[in-house]
Structure formats: structure tokens, C-alpha cells
Amino acid sequence: MSDVYSIPPYIAITLVDWGLMQGISKSSMAEALSLGDVSELSAEKCQLSANDYEQLLALLYKETGQQQLGLLIGASINIADYGVLGHAMLSAATVGEAIHLGLEYYRLTSSFMTLTSSTDDENFHITARLDYDLAAIRQFAPEELLLGLTQVARQLLGEDFSPITVHFNTAKPDYSDDLARFFRCPMVFEQELCRFVLAKNLLSLPLKTANALTASQLLRLCQSLLQTNPPKIEDDLLTKLQAVIKAKVNVWPTMVTVAKVLGLSERTLRRRLEALGTDYQQQVELVRQQLAKQLIANHQVSVEQVAAVLGYSEAASFRRAFHRWWGMSPQLYRQETQIGR
């Protein structure tokens, strides 16, 4: 199911590093990401789904109680954390060219929002719309994006930079004073879209890190990477579909029911899934596999109980299915999970 995996792991790597500093085990974070080990995040072709990020963020919010996770991660971002794109931006001739590169190729980063830009007489606006209606991403992404944009701008322009204003599509949080100290500009909450505004005259400023040859080489690499791994916007459909299935796991909803929840006809849902090389039953099976791992990792739940939750009339049938999915018995997986903690 390669079509499910469409988001680069840059932010996941930062989140895992932060989680380790908070005492969260590698095994629990790898499980949330549906990986065998968190070291797989560094693999050249590693891609994650929105649901993978959702599960990791949900784990970090739950285990640490740090509701300002987006602030903590966004404020720590370095432009080089964006990989090839970050270095291309640093090599650009002007601030405007660097921002143009960022907006052209931001899908090469761990992006959870669709970005657009516009200008008026005095200001340049970057507007962001959330791609995934998932609770943890919805909480994390606006702060991570707006703080990350400010961090990048400060690396390009100097630490004295502040936006003209920032708009959040979320409610004003309890830690808004911390946000105000970071941005040093007016903030507006509960807006339809996120918005980052800076003075238009800054775009013409030259960059001290400019290098024409490096910029040309990295631009070609960005173009090549985007052609090789184009953004898969339909990942949003699969994420929403899997979330609906999980919410009704005890009854395993029919395709007609799920299509209605998603605001689609059964025929349209089938057609869009076919275009992604999958079908409804494969998605149910994928959810069942993911839930099997999560439930088996909970040592307070018996194998028989897990089998019943997943709709198996006999535990033996579930054990055979689990071995087929993951190459080991539920008991062995549970033992290895316990050892990794």
C-alpha cells in the first residue's frame, strides 16, 4: 500500500528525538509510526502517512502532557532540518527567492498544510489550510508551521525579525503568552485559515549565504525529488476513511455507511479507491492489522479479547492472521514489545 505513505519524515525525526528526551521509549514511538524501529526514519526512501504522524503526536501529547508541543518543536526548527530544500533556500540570492523556493517545493518537507501566497501594497502573505482533519495534527500543525516560518525567516533575516501578524485557525491556548514572546507581533485566533504576514520590502534583501552555483544544483535536485515523489493529496481520503473504520471497529461498518460519513456516494468512494490501487476491504484489513499491533502491545488485554474486538469468533483464527500479517505470533510480538520498553 505505498500510496498511503506520502509525507517525508523530517518532523517525525525531530519529534522522536524530543520524545526520547522526555523518556518515551523508542519501541512505543516506532509502534505509533508502524515501524519496526525508529532508525527506519533515516532511510532514504522513508515516507509516512498522515495517520502515522497522528498516532505519534497523540502518543507524545498523552505521555508528556505538553499541550504546547507545536510551540516547542516549531521554535526548535533549523532551516537545515528541511533537508535539500532548506539548503537550497540558504543558497538563494535574496529573501524573496528563498521564500519562492520554499513555497514551490514545501511538499518535500513534512507538510500538513497546503500553502498559498499573495501580496498587497505593503505586505506579503503566506496562507495555510490544514490537509488532515485529525485531532492531534489539527492541534500541532498550525503552531509548528507558523513558528517554523518565523524561525526560517530569522535565519534568513536575523534574530530581530518578527512577522507583521500571525493568524491561527485554532482557539487561543492557555500558553498564548509564550507564543506572544516568541512572535513579538499581534496574534489573531479562531480564523478560518492560518496566515503569516511580513513586510514586502524584505523580499528584495540579499542573503549572506547566497551561492549561485549551489543554488542552481540544489534547485535541480528539488525538481527531481518532487517529480520522483509527487505529493499524494488523496492520502487525506485514506486517512479519513481509516479513521471512520476505526471509530466503528466493533461493528466493521459497510462501505455504504463509511461513504455516507465521508459525504460521498458508494460509487464515488469505490472509484477513488480504485484510482489509488486499493479497495474498501483492503482498507478494513489494513485497519485491522494496525489495531491488532496496538492491542497486542497492551499487556492487560488478553489475546482472546483482542480476537473478539477484531471480529474473530476464535482466537486461533486471529493468531493465524496475526502471524500472516507480521511474521510472528501475538505472544512473541508481545514479548518483544515488552523487552523494547
Image: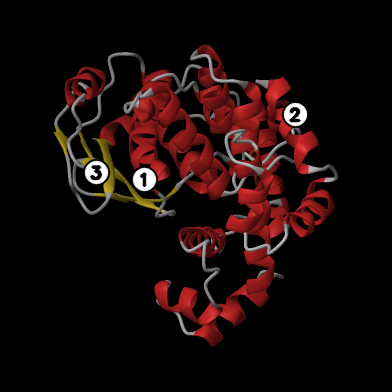
- Residue 98 at least partly seen: yes
Residue at the (48%, 73%) spot, across then down: 258
Q: Are marks 3 and 1 in contact (CB under 8 Å)?
A: yes
Vertical position of residue 205 compared to residue 272: above or below: above
Q: Which of 283 and 138 lies nearest the eye of the viewer? A: 283
Residue 335 image label:
2
Q: Secondary structure at mark 1?
A: helix
* Left or right, 72 with reference to 97: left
Q: Secondary structure at mark 2?
A: helix
Give the mark count: 3
Q: In the rendered structure, which amino acid carries the disc numbered 1? A: Arg
Residue 138 image label:
1
Q: Pick whichever of labels 1 and 2 is earlier in the sequence.
A: 1
Q: In the rendered structure, which amino acid carries the disc numbered 2? A: Gln
Counting from the top left corner in percent of width and height, residue 65 is at 36, 24
Residue at the (83%, 49%) spot, across then down: 323
Q: Pick whichever of labels 3 and 2 is earlier in the sequence.
A: 3
Q: Which residue is mark 3?
A: 170
Counting from the top left corner in percent of width and height, residue 170 is at 24, 43
* Left or right, 170 with reference to 295: left
* Left or right, 204 with reference to 162: right
How packed is label 3: few (under 14 Cα within 10 Å), some, or many (20 or more)? some
Q: Which of 2 and 311 lies nearest the eye of the viewer? A: 311
Looking at the rendered image, the disc whose residue lies closer to the viewer, 1 or 2, is: 2
